[in-house]
Amino acid sequence: MSAPSPTFSVIVVCKNPGSRLKAALASVWEQAGCTLELIVIDGASTDGTREWLETQRTRLAHFLSEPDGGVYEAMNKGLALASGEWVLFLGADDRLVGANVLNEVLSWMKRTEAGVVVGEVAYNDGRIYKLSSHVNPLPRNFVHHQGTFYRRTLFAESGDFDTSLAIMGDYELNLRLWKNHVRFKPMKLRVSACGTGGLSDAGRWRGYAEEIRVRHRYAAAWRCWFWDALSVVRWLRKKIVRTFKRRR
């Protein structure tokens, strides 16, 4: 008789993360009161991460280390291995905020039929993100994956991450699910703490260009123009701030 499927599949993707990965995985290993599987997809790290993960194989449901085409290809590899009812994606700079947080999330799950449940995410620089009860999905990505739980069945129904996108694959997936009338439910619970400087946080033009591209994929051009202009303004503002900091 096969074992029952876990409630959560926690997928961690990384490449040359250094020692910070240990804190991320430790925050998952310490979870109590729920069933979960931890899946680590490593992009063929050369900093000793691969060798360390080999020593932890018995604590991982699945571990894969090989070259990939980017973070979203790695996430898709993790999805292919997942068997949990709910999927959470973490990066090497992220960690769950307490040993009981997934058990608390489970209590919320029992009270909703939503396809996506979104908790709070806190960044090290003081920023806090949570899902508004009245969402406008056009301005920018409206949920952060470090605090977002997806029903695994959604990926079979709506498809995986678009690997043609290097930075805004999250936004494309979320907007696609939104357009498919998947319900997003806010959860008044802080799920994870995150480091700064990730792909979408780096301020590169490519990220804003992909944001505009995704927006036009799912909305009429006339609905996008105002938000496109704001994307350009946000990019310019971040560029100016970064230039000023370098000169100080």
Image (spheres, rainbow, N blue to C red):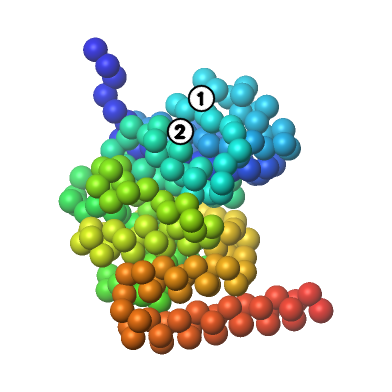
Residue type indicated by callout 1 = Arg
Which label sits on residue 59? 1
178 or 241: which is nearer to us? Answer: 178
> Badge 2 is on which residue?
38
Q: Quadrant of residue 106?
A: top left
Where 137 sits versus 151, above or below? Answer: below
Disc 2 element: strand
Tell which circle, 1 or 2, labels the residue nearer the N-terminal end. Answer: 2
Q: Residue at x 37, y 57 (%)?
A: 173
The residue closer to the viewer here, 222 or 144, is 222
x then y, percent, for residue 4:
26, 24
Q: Residue placed at 70% from the left, 75% from the top?
A: 242
| Residue sitting at the far right | 247
**From this viewpoint, which residue is outermost toward the top?**
1
Between residues 53 and 97, which one lies in front from this camera angle? 53
Looking at the rendering, in which quadrant would you find the C terminus? bottom right
User: Which element type, helix, strand or loop, lies under badge 1?
Assistant: helix
The type of residue carrying mark 2 is Leu
Q: Residue at x 45, y 33 (%)?
A: 38
The quadrant of the image that shows the N terminus is top left
Can residue 162 be seen in this snapshot? yes
Work out how far the residue at label 1 is from the one at label 2, CA to CA, in angstroms: 8 Å
Would residue 129 be found to the left or right of residue 34 on screen?
Answer: right
